[in-house]
């Protein structure tokens, strides 16, 4: 199914047709692309703080090799490997790595590549810093006058009683950092001080993180993929609605296990007014956080049906996650189409840094 903003109905169809025409592989483009990966000591799919996107590198290699002449996989094990990469000056580095730790030295990949005028995908350090800290992200969003739920950060024993809590119950509590709904479960919605204390302590014990508490939003939940047009730089919003079955308390909580087991339902946004409202908020949020190339903005409605920014992911997963499903439901893209679009955006939008 292809969902369209009524105002841009013709443009969406035109863009899809143009995209299909651009990706005819009879003549390969003379570009060098290196798919950059980093060793994972805990196993291929284990979580790594320094990796934003886990790549299916062999699949991506096959896809990009259909279109581009020189595509390879590069495994960065040390700083010398990284120095060799910049000397080769590929036309694009396709990677989900945020940063490298070489001893005590921390090198943010995209900033490093930009210093050597090498194009890349996704955002730079400043934007990734903005989105990774949920408190910082919401402060930036609020300064940009974008709607978000009231919030505050907290740690165990900071608040001695209900009177010191700055916003009213019910609250939604989650770790200040981390993705994939880690730390979110049926106890994340708290209605009183005792449950508040218990959840904040649990997050500190299990994740060693401060908590962020926000006004609990009772409305529908959305995730909006963002794709930057490779030529014009115009942002395209790709919203989907996420539906989760209610628990025994009557709450729909998109928790870690539901995401892990793929138990939620992801559908196209058919209501044009909602489509336009959440698209606008998502694009404004992406810009405010300094996003580039691609990303994902999570949004939830309040009880009045007003969309509110929840959090952002400026290095969204590409493997059957919400970003991929947003591309499928809004643009009719295959996985291959999506990879080509991301690579083409990287090549085109970064042309100015190679001059």
Image (cartoon, rainbow, N blue to C red):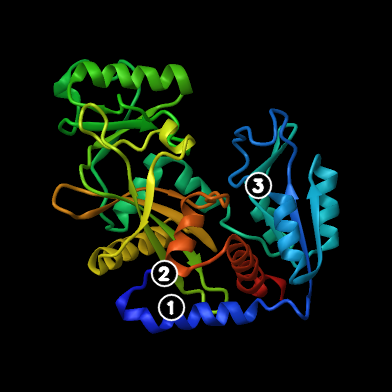
User: Upstream in the sequence, badge 2 or badge 3?
Assistant: 2
Marks 2 & 1, CB-CB < 8 Å contact: yes
Between the C-alphas of marks 2 and 3, the distance is: 31 Å
Residue at the image point whose x is 75% and y is 32% from the top: 103
Q: Is residue 162 above or below residue 90?
A: above
Q: Residues within 10 Å of mark 1 (few under 14, many from 20)?
A: some
Instruction: Tell me where residue 214 appears, x and y as whole percent.
Output: 26, 37
Task: Give the camera-side residue of 234 and 124.
Answer: 234
Mark number displayed over residue 2: 2
Tell me which label, 2 or 1, sits earlier in the chain. Answer: 2
Q: Earlier in the sequence, mark 3 or mark 1?
A: 1
192 sits to left or right of 337: left
**Which residue occupies 28% across, 57% down?**
146
Q: Is residue 273 left or right of residue 40?
A: left
- For mark 2, give the secondary structure: loop
Give the quarter of the figure containing the N terminus.
Answer: bottom left
Name the front one of labels 2 and 3: 2
In this view, the residue farthest toward the front is 1
Depth check, mark 2 against mark 1: the one in front is: 2
Residue at mark 2 to residue at mark 1: CA–CA distance: 9 Å
At mark 1, the secondary structure is helix
Instruction: Give the label on residue 97, or none.
Output: 3
Q: Nearer the viewer, residue 143 or 286?
A: 286
Which is closer to the viewer, label 3 or label 1? Answer: 1
Residue 22 position in % (x across, y down): 63, 80
Q: Which residue is mark 1?
A: 12
Whether residue 159 appears in this view of the structure is no
- Frontmost residue, 209 versus 238: 238
Q: Is residue 24 left or right of residue 310?
A: right
Where's residue 340, x and y in %? 64, 67
Callout 3: SS: loop
Q: Does residue 40 sit above or below 4 in this rendering?
A: above
């Amino acid at each position: 199914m292809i969902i369209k903003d009524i105002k841009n109905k013709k443009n969406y169809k035109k863009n899809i047709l143009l995209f299909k025409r651009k990706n005819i592989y009879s003549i390969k483009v003379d570009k060098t692309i290196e798919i950059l990966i980093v060793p994972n000591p805990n196993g291929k799919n284990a979580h790594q703080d320094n990796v934003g996107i886990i790549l299916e590198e062999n699949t991506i290699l096959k896809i990009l090799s259909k279109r581009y002449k020189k595509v390879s996989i590069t495994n960065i094990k040390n700083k010398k490997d990284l120095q060799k990469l910049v000397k080769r000056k590929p036309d694009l580095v396709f990677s989900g790595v945020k940063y490298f730790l070489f001893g005590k030295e921390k090198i943010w990949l995209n900033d490093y590549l930009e210093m050597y005028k090498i194009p890349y995908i996704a955002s730079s350090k400043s934007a990734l810093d903005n989105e990774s800290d949920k408190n910082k992200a919401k402060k930036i969003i609020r300064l940009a006058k974008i709607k978000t739920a009231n919030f505050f950060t907290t740690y165990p024993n900071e608040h001695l009683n209900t009177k010191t809590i700055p916003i009213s119950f019910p609250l939604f509590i989650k770790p200040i950092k981390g993705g994939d709904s880690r730390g979110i479960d049926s106890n994340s919605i708290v209605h009183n001080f005792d449950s508040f204390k218990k959840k904040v302590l649990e997050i500190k014990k299990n994740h060693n993180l401060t908590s962020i508490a926000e006004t609990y939003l009772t409305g529908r939940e959305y995730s909006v993929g963002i794709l930057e047009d490779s030529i014009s730089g115009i942002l395209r919003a790709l919203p989907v609605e996420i539906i989760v079955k209610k628990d025994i308390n009557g709450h729909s909580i998109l928790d870690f296990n539901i995401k892990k087991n793929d138990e939620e339902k992801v559908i196209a946004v058919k209501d044009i007014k909602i489509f336009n409202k959440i698209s606008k908020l998502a694009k404004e949020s992406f810009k405010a956080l300094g996003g580039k190339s691609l990303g994902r903005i999570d949004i939830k409605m309040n009880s009045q049906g007003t969309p509110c920014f929840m959090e952002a992911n400026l290095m969204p997963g590409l493997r059957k996650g919400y970003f991929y499903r947003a591309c499928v439901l809004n643009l009719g893209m295959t996985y291959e189409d999506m990879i080509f679009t991301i690579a083409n955006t990287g090549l085109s939008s970064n042309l100015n840094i190679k001059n």
